[in-house]
Image: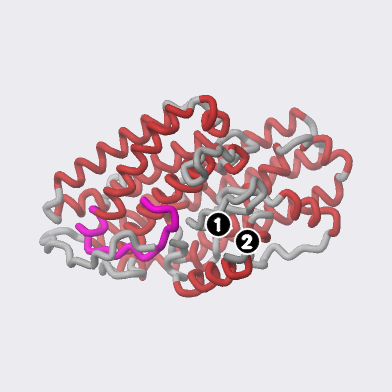
Amino acid sequence: MTSLKKITIALSILIAGVLFFACSKSSSGDTNTPTPDPGFDKAAMLTGYADQLIIPAYNSLQQKMTALQTASAAFTAAPSATTQQSLKEAYTATRLQYAHVEAFNFGPAAVELLDAFGNFAGGLDYNFTTDGELTGYSVDSVLIEKNISSGNYDLTVYSRNSCYAQGFPALEYLYFGPDAVAKFSANTAARTKYVKDVTDRLKSIIDKVVSSWASYRSSFIANTKSDVGSPIGNIVNQLAYQMDMLKGPRIGWPFGKQSNGTVFASKSEAYYSGLSGQLAVENLTSLKTFFTNASGSKGISAYLVALKKETLNTDVLAQFDVTIAKLQAIPSPLSASFSEHAADVDNAYKEIQKLLTLLKTDVASATGVQISFMDNDGD
C-alpha cells in the first residue's frame, strides 16, 4: 500500500470519526443489547468521569505543559547538561501526565487531533519494512532537521510526516537526542525557533481541549446510550484501543512480534528519553483507573456489576493487576530489554493479549458496545 494511499485512508477515518479518533478492524461485530441495568445511574457515572477524572487530568496536563515551556525556554537560552537535566524533569512530568489523558481521545481531543499532533503512532497499521519506515512511535528526524534548516514548515498540516515531526516525540529528539546540547549551541536561533513553535502548538492544542470540555461536558453527561459515538461507546472503545496500542506500537512491534523476531528498539515510545517502560506502566495504570473511575465515582467496572457480570469484572480487574506487575518487572530502558530481557517482555506481552481480549470482546459485548476501530496485526 502506498504512503499516499495510507494517508488518504487515515484522513477518511479521521473525518468519519470526529467523536472517536482511532484507526483500526472490528474484532468483535457483537452488537448485542446489554442485560437491563435497573437502578444504575449512567448519567451519574458519566458526571463522575467528567468532573473527577477527565477534566482534572486535562487541567493537570495544561499546567505541566506550561512548566515544560518554561524549562524549554531556559534550556534553549543556555543549553548545558544542567539545564537539560531540569528540562528532562519537566518533560518527564508532562509526558507521564499525557499518558493519563490518552484514553480520553474523543470529543474535544478528537476534534483538535491531540493524539495525532501530540504523540503520533500511525494508528494500528503495521508495516515496518525497513528501519527507516515511519510507523509506530517513529520520529522523522530527517524532516525535523530539514524544517530547522529551511525555516519553511507548517505544523498544522495533517500528514504522516508532519505528525512525526512534532509533538512530544519531536521535542524528545530535540531535547535528548544525540549531541542535543551541542546542536543547540551550534544552531541556536533556528533550532530554538523550531522547539518554541512545536511547544507553543502543543500547548495551544491542549488549551483548546481544556476549554472545549467546559461546553462538551453537558452533552457528554446527557447521552447515556451505548451506540457508536456515545460517551459509553467511546469509553469502552478507548479502553480496547489503548490496549491494542500497548500490544502493537508500544510493545509488540518494536519487540519484533510482527517482524519475525527482528527488534526495532528505536521505534520504542519515548526512545530518546528512556521513558518507554515507565510510560507503558503509566498508560496501563491509567486505563485501570479509567475502567473503575477510581476517583470515587462508579465507572465501567460498577456498570458491569449492575449488568450481572460480576465474574467478568473480577477477571478484568485481576488481569489489570497481573499485566501491570509483568510490565513493572521489565528492566529499564524498555528499548534495551527487548533484546536483553526478552523473556520478561514476552511474559508481559502474553498478559497484555489476555487483557485486550477481555476488554475488546467480553466487556464490549456485555455493555452492548460495538468496537468501531480496526487493527491490522490480529489479536
Q: What residue type is labelled 1?
A: Gly
Asked which quadrant contains residue 238, the reply is bottom left
Q: Residue at x 59, y 60 (%)?
A: 205
Dot 1: within a 10 Å radius of its alpha carbon, few (fewer than 14), some, or many (20 or more) residues? many
Q: Residue at x 49, y 53 (%)?
A: 58
Q: Residue at x 44, y 58 (%)?
A: 376
Percent coordinates x, y for residue 264 in the rendering:
58, 40
Residue 286 seen in the figure: yes
Q: What residue type is labelled 2?
A: Arg
Question: Left or right: where does residue 274 sit relative to residue 378?
Answer: right
255, 281: nearer the viewer: 255
Give the residue furthest to the front.
260
Percent coordinates x, y for residue 363 in the rendering:
24, 54
The residue that disc 1 covers is: 122
Q: What stretch is highlighted in magenta?
A: 362-379
Asked which quadrant contains residue 276, the reply is top right
Mark number, residue 160: 2
Question: Left or right: where does residue 5 sit relative to residue 214?
Answer: right
Percent coordinates x, y for residue 124 in the rendering:
48, 56
Protein image colouring: secondary structure
